[in-house]
Image (cartoon, rainbow, N blue to C red):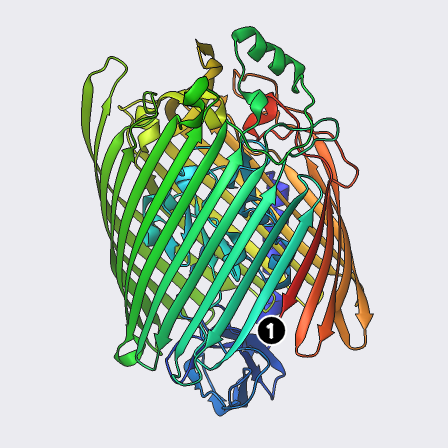
Amino acid sequence: MSKSVILSIFIFLLAFNALGQEGCTLTIRGKVLHEENNEPIVGAYVWLIDSETGAVTDTQGNFRIQKICPGELTLRVQFMGHKEYFEKIILNSNLNMTIRMKAEDIQLEGVEIHGHEDALLTTNTVSGIYGEELRLSRGQNLGETLRRIPGITSFSSGSSIQKPVIHGLHSNRILILNNGVRLEGQQWGADHAPEIDPFLAREISVVKGAETVRFGPNAMGGVILVNPAPLPVKGGQSGEIDLIGFSNGRGLNGSVGLLGGSEKLKGLGYWIQASSKFAGNLQTPDYMLDNTGVREMNFSGALGYSNSRLGTEVYFSHFQTTIGILTDSHTGNLSDLESIIENGRPFRNPDFTFDIRSPKQNVDHQLLKVKGHYHLADGAKLNLQYAFQRNHRQEFDRRRGDLNSRPSLDLMLFTNTIDLSYNHQTRKNWNGSVGVQLIQQANSNIPGTGVVPLIPNYDMLNVGFFAIEKFTSGPLEIEGGLRYDFRHVEAARINRGGILQEDVFDFNNFSAFIGAMYPITRNLTFNTNLGSAWRPPSINEQFSQGLHHGLAGIEIGNPDFVSEQSLKWMNTLNYSDSKFNIELTGYTNRINNYIYLNPTEEQFVSIRGTFNVFEYLQTDAFFAGADLSAIWTLSSHWEFFSRGSLVRAKNTTEDSFLPFIPTDRLETGLSYNFLTGISKKESKISFSNLAVAKQKREPDFDLAPAPPAYMLWNLGLQTGIQMGDNKLNIGLQVTNLFDAAYKDYMNRFRYFSHEMGRNVMIKLNYEF
């Protein structure tokens, strides 16, 4: 960045700061809670009647009103189903306060809900998808949904398997929380999509910075929180039904959910949800992609009880899927492999079918959570959570005779986690938490595959201790934390020589962070976060020794790898007023001992076919980049939006580029709201363009050059029809409107095929 640009930004900030310093400078900060159970109220309106300024409480019930003049003021708080709160305040200095609202026994439209999932309050940059935007994403997998957030892309193996990428990092460097539980599957594989149903989410949040202090080593690249609806505490029921049809794959996707509370026992609530997906072969603009169908069947539910002191919850989810793997990614000999890479597309043009044959994946995942919290004196709270997970992954290769029905990879992973934490908060300047986390895992290769296992059997135990503290002084927030983790791993396998190989590894490290958030003016906020993180090598990086069929490649690991160490610094500016909202994030991330999968010039030939060889390597790496998000309300009808990101990554040891780093991208769009009476949210049409650059920073060797840049046009239509107390939402979405043929650099199957073509989705959502 040039000196003139830096100077311009500095002058810009000084100007805003000067504007903000004129006149009134006081700040009121506070927290709004339910009186009956001390849980935070999300979305309460907090208003200063005298100055006509206010705020809305966030996901933890917090609010902040800035630039207030001294004097006598009247504070008003409103939230549906609760008595209005009024308080006279004589304001001479900055004020921190806690407000408790009392529920009213009146008939409401829908069910009253109180949040029981602790929100993540952090000085790191957090982006979220919820409400109307989340409903518009229904029918997409988690990777596709998250691409709506700047800085989030996906690493894919075909069009059906997508893993989230945050600032160039993915897989074991990204932690996904399913209703507050760290999702533990075989996430090390690039072809292993997260075992989670996006339909269960009421909100999806992404923390882009390192969060290893809160969550442990797997959070060094960021955290994705998938949160369902909080449990009701009053009687009544509400629900939602989704039905989605899509043209590409000729598939159907549906979900039904029910949320309710007990009329007889106040504080008892429940929700249940189920979804299913059925699709056949996908199609590019020019040809069919053979064996790319998908089947999915999911279920989840929760039951909980809470009162003014105690809160409990039991949660269960089941995820099951069968995914076809592109047949043409598996070739029979070396010349076929070289020919299809050179051709850039399959030689065959198969017919459409719903059948799924080998190669394919069968995955099922169960999660059980039991959680409780107890409110102590002075706003403190004690939390205890236990979770059990079972992950069963089968991968089927194309094999001869009876072997074709037997999996070539059959893994069973059991995980137990215990989280114990203590949170304290006061009306003064300090709040924070301390805790301990225990993770135990056992992974087994189920016998009978007839193939040397790709990874060994292993047992893992991880113990972590952490402390986080936040200091608040007026508009300034400063937060810091420290964590220590110890991990013990025992691995055993029969190597290719038929000899039992046993290995024991111990890893331990400290991680820490410090961050701050400061509102420069009423509209401009700055936050910064500097965090260290670490990650021990995962079992596949140490021991992979064979065909990973989902990637159509041979993977070779190295047991001598040491832990990764990173230091990430992230800064965000956010400007928001009634017409304009813009957020700009810049970051740098130094990772020592960075482990990556590198394509080699070798091929492996066997009776199962010919496959590319990929080798895990370790080096020092440096990442840097920026994210931009902007929304401009042009008028009551028109709205313009733009979101973009860029990532730069280098192998600093060899002064070369790293493989599979996201390319620069920018999405811009325009939407028109049709006004009906006083409402402007009932009907909308949107038109957008996604521009993705060519990856010019390639490693020294790749199986094929990076594909050219591409542009995609997308169209969306939506309307809502009120049906008494219920509502029917109707939507039409068209992606790749002009059916462009393209390849994405972050798709491992770009060597063999193009991306899917135009897709028309019709969406029905019924709220009752």
Judged from this view, the residue extending furthest toward the top is: 335
User: Whole-percent x and y of residue 459?
Assistant: 22, 38
Residue at the spot of label 1 = 22
Q: From the image, which quarter does the N terminus lie in?
A: top right
Q: Which residue is pictured at 59% across the width and 51% down the height?
A: 584
Q: Position of residue 531 (x, y in %)?
A: 38, 47
The residue shown at (48%, 90%) is 89
Q: Is residue 593 visible?
A: no
In-front residue for pair 450/545: 450
Question: How many numbered marks does the figure carry?
Answer: 1
Front one among 86 and 402:
402
Residue 112 image offset from top left, x and y in percent: 50, 79
Considering only vertical position in the picture, is 520 above or below 334? below
The foreground one among 178 and 123 is 178
Q: Tell me if residue 728 comes above or below residue 549 in the rendering.
A: below
- Would you call the spot at circle 1 few (<14 residues within 10 Å), some (14-19), or many (20 or more)? few
Secondary structure under the numbered disc 1 in the rendered image = loop
Residue 389 versus residue 337 in the image, above or below? below
* Residue under the point 66% across and 31% down: 755
Q: Nearer the viewer, residue 164 or 617?
A: 164
